[in-house]
Image (tube, rainbow, N blue to C red):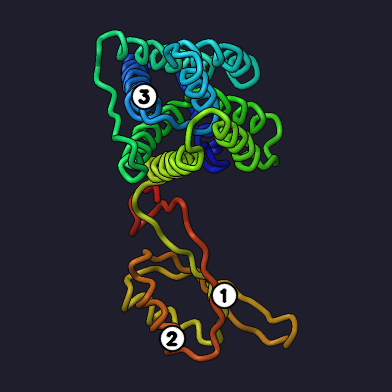
Amino acid sequence: MVTKQQLNNAEAERSLTNKKKLTPRDFAFTAAGILLSGILQALSVQCFIVPNAFAPGGITGVASILEYIFKFNVGYFLLAMNVPFIILGAIFVSPRFGIVSGLSIVLSSLLTVLIEKTGFPPLFFGADAGERTIAAIAGGVLGGVGSAIMLKLGGSRGGTDILAAIIQRRYSATNIAWFIFVLDGIVVLASVFVYPNPIVPIMLALIEIYVESKVTEVILQGFQSALKFEIVTKDPEGLSRDIMENLARGVTMLPAKGMYTGSDSALLICVVRKRQMTQFREILKRHEGTFAYVSGANEVMGEGFGSAHKL
């Protein structure tokens, strides 16, 4: 499942790509990304999801259910159901989005068929739910990496992700994450009527969806993270000096005024690493009369954090 943040990242990537001319190096990079994403998606579905009889959300989940019922390779269902979405993506998002997404979908669908034809062993972890959890985690990791690659390339892995991209493009204020969650939930709940012992497939599907989402998020935003503090204080000089000397972080000061008391104060803005949180709290304790609140920083650029560091 894609989140709104992931869709925004993909939208920014598409806008940047559309503005610049595609060089041979860009073409080679895109082709390699499509190939790798297709391989990972095929391995995730054919080797981990289908053999262990559970259906994650979206088109992949629907295709997995159909494969279980009709015993027909999941790749054919993935390709057939994604064709309309590819066309819609090319029309309503951009031609490049449709081409990149379409190539990845076609490749991953054909590879799932090829994996079966070549006798590549499916990784079935047994009837025990604990063992099958490994399959759900592995499928989520591979699917998350493949999904992140496609979002980085300005494309999509297909299905409801393309539908989400279209809606996000036309109605940016729409809660896409909730919309996709509902669609995925319908698919997961539908598996109750297909698989034996339905509770286990549902739990496996939820694990796969969660792992895939988190892996995609980590790849798109990076492993590092930071926190932004905004502090209201009457001792801006002393507090700023304490932060700069003990945390080696810069501080920005803005004039502030308490509307209830009418007293003048200062607003300090500071970005620190998460690992510095405990030290920061100790510094605040040394300065009475301060009021602070914190928010997460997804991306920090500039001195002390690298030139353009994804967080």
Q: Residue at x 70, y 29 (%)?
A: 170
Dot 3 amino acid type: Ser
Q: Residue at x 43, y 39 (%)?
A: 208
Please give the residue where the numbered disc 2 appears in the rendered image. 238
Q: Quadrant of residue 141?
A: top left
For label 1, the crowd category at 10 Å Cα-Cα, with few meaning under 14, some 14 to 19 and many 20 or more, is many
Q: Is residue 196 above or below residue 134?
A: above
Secondary structure, mark 3, is helix
Q: Is residue 308 above or below residue 44?
A: below
- Residue 73 in the image, given as x and y percentages of width and height: 42, 13
* Real-space CA distance between mark 3 and mark 2, rounded to the nearest whole angstrom: 52 Å
Horizontal arrangement in the rendering, residue 84 relative to residue 171 (left or right): left
Dot 2 amino acid type: Gly
- Residue 138 in the image, given as x and y percentages of width and height: 32, 37
- 65 or 99: nearer the eye? 65
Secondary structure, mark 1, is strand
Please give the residue where the numbered disc 3 appears in the rendered image. 37
Circle 1 or circle 3, nearest the eye: 3
Q: Quadrant of residue 227?
A: bottom left
Q: Residue at x 43, y 40 (%)?
A: 204
Q: Which mark is residue 267?
A: 1
Q: Earlier in the sequence, mark 3 or mark 2?
A: 3
* Real-space CA distance between mark 1 and mark 3, rounded to the nearest whole angstrom: 46 Å
* Real-space CA distance between mark 1 and mark 2, rounded to the nearest whole angstrom: 13 Å
Secondary structure, mark 2, is helix
